[in-house]
Image (cartoon, rainbow, N blue to C red):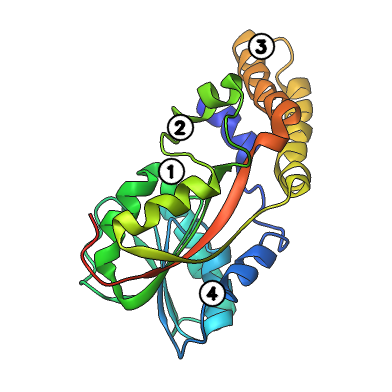
């Protein structure tokens, strides 16, 4: 029951909105001019960013995800937009990719690095990037140092490597990258485009599952997540990090 209810809460959130793509475009514009680059979008989901990268770059884009249903949505949209010659949906795990070394000019990862960890991702994905190529990450971040214990206890089990932007930047040279630029998403973006929508769905599901204690407990837990963000929003959110592969092997 828990999986089904959480799917009802979270499935499709943000997929129908184009607002988040403003940040994808902003990050892409931090890259130097690229001529028909080959781009790998890791953890692409239904491919909103994948398709936007194809539009922005006029290049070849591979969207990789482990969720076959999400990739079906991407493939349908690729056909609809006439991008079949430039966008490929690939089923696979980011932890076990068999692309050839130096296959891509750009690796893009929005909200997927936490699945394997920041350091591991930078180390493992570096071999796939061509010399002087680029890595762009959008991931959770502490917006201030020394976050309150309540949110540390909530987020570190999910993303052990979560850090401030400064903390991420400090690690980059250890893995063979240099920073080109970064920016954090505004606090009101996450409230308006995620947590407020979650709260609205929880409210509706409370009526649907009224009188079912197990379901009500799950909804209570998910509401606690919303309440935690409402209380501590200035402390955590997400950031884009745009970096370039340097010389050397990294660690």
Q: Which-is-in-front pick, marks 1 and 3? A: 1
> Which residue has dot 3 on it?
212
Instruction: Answer whether labels 2 and 1 touch (C-beta < 8 Å).
Output: yes
Mark 2 lies on a secondary structure that is loop
Label 2, label 4: how many angstroms apart (C-alpha)?
28 Å
Could you tell which of marks 2 and 3 lies nearer the N-terminus? 2
| Residue 172 figure quarter | bottom left
Q: Is residue 69 left or right of residue 151?
A: left
Q: Which-is-in-front pick, marks 2 and 3? A: 2
Residue at position x 77%, y 38% in the image: 196
> Which residue has dot 4 on it?
53
Q: Is residue 43 left or right of residue 246?
A: right
> Which residue has dot 2 on it?
158
Asked if residue 92 shows in the view, the reply is no
> Which residue has dot 1 on it?
114
Percent of width and height locating residue 59 = 46, 84
Asked if residue 37 shows in the view, the reply is yes
């Amino acid at each position: 029951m828990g999986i089904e209810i959480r799917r009802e809460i979270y499935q499709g959130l943000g997929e129908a909105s184009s607002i988040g793509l403003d940040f994808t475009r902003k990050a892409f514009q931090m890259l130097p001019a690229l001529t028909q680059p080959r781009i790998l979008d890791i953890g692409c989901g239904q491919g909103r960013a994948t398709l936007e990268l194809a539009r922005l770059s006029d290049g070849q884009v591979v969207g990789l995800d482990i969720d076959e249903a999400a990739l079906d949505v991407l493939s349908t949209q690729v056909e609809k937009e006439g991008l079949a010659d430039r966008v490929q949906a690939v089923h696979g795990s980011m932890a076990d990719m068999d692309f050839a070394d130096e296959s891509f000019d750009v690796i893009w990862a929005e909200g997927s690095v936490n699945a394997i960890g920041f350091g591991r991702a930078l180390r493992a994905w570096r071999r796939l990037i061509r010399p002087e190529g680029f890595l762009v990450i959008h991931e959770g971040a502490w917006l201030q140092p020394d976050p309150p214990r309540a949110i540390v206890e909530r987020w570190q089990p999910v993303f052990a490597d979560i850090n401030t932007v400064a903390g991420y930047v400090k690690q980059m040279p250890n893995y063979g990258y240099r920073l080109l630029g970064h920016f954090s998403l505004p606090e009101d973006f996450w409230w308006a485009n995620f947590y407020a929508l979650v709260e609205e769905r929880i409210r509706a599901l409370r009526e649907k599952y009224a009188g079912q204690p197990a379901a009500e407990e799950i909804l209570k837990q998910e509401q606690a997540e919303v309440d935690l963000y409402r209380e501590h929003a200035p402390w955590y959110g997400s950031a884009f990090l745009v970096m370039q592969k340097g010389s050397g092997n990294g660690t």
